[in-house]
Image (cartoon, helix red, strand yellow):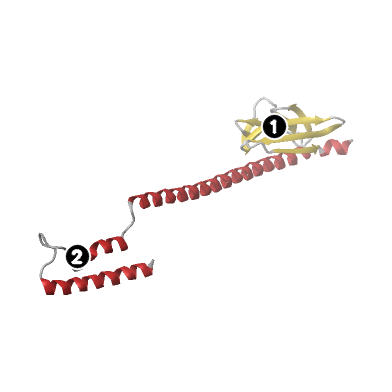
Amino acid sequence: MVNRASACRRQAIVAFRAGVAERSRHGKAGTEGKPVTGWRAWLPGLALGCRGLTLIEVLVTAVLLSLILGAAYFVVDSTMLNWKKGDEQVDVQQNLRLAMDRLTRELRVSAGVDEINPQSYIIFKSPDNAKYIKYYLYGGEIKRATSSNKIIWEGDNPVAGRVQAVSFQGVTGLPATVEIKLTGTNGFVLTSRVTVRMIREQN
């Protein structure tokens, strides 16, 4: 590319000098009825040797550039989308693990399970039998509330979000054991079995 540009410049300089010399000998060239000589005669050759891009070449270049930019955008967009999905999955799993850890820890040291709704909530007694503790699913969140009479509940504090479903089931043959299953909004399922410590020690 550089060699071609240098050759074009040299060619133009030679043609200009030849034209100046010709005009100095014969006067003005290219007037009406006279053949064009000197540097003017070199113009067609210079135009062919040092021409720019044609319209077709510009269009082809623009199309290729558009394809390259489109492919790059697709790759970046796909990467960002996958990263966002992965980040959301990690967030859901962390929420479920935090909820499961708190629920199992409280249930394990409780005074026993009082009531279970398999697809909605679990109620158990506090270690000192002074109150009831309820974990339940509401609006995509696991919440915790306390009550002294199971009629008026206080707290309703969210423990974890992005929860799609819960399941509380007693384990056959193990009266002091509860199986807990939490399902996240991304389909991730976390399962754990908890044995109430007080009842187990009494037995």
Determine crowd level at label 1: few under 14, some 14-19, many 20+ residues with C-alpha closer than 10 A. many
Q: Which residue is mark 2?
A: 40
x 66%, y 42%: residue: 93
Residue 153: x and y in percent read: 64, 29
- The kind of secondary structure element at disc 1 is strand
Q: How far, Cα to Cα, is label 1 from label 2?
A: 90 Å
Of the pair 167 and 41, the residue shown nearer to us: 41
Which residue is at the far right?
203
Q: Where 3 sits versus 119, above or below? A: below
x 16%, y 72%: residue: 22
- Residue 166 has which mark? 1
Residue 181: x and y in percent read: 73, 35
Of the pair 38 and 111, the residue shown nearer to us: 38
Where residue 40 sits, quadrant-wise, is bottom left
x 21%, y 73%: residue: 18
Q: Where 54 sits versus 188, above or below? A: below
Q: Is residue 179 visible?
A: yes
The residue type indicated by label 1 comes to: Val
Q: Is residue 16 left or right of residue 171?
A: left
Q: Is residue 55 left or right of residue 165?
A: left
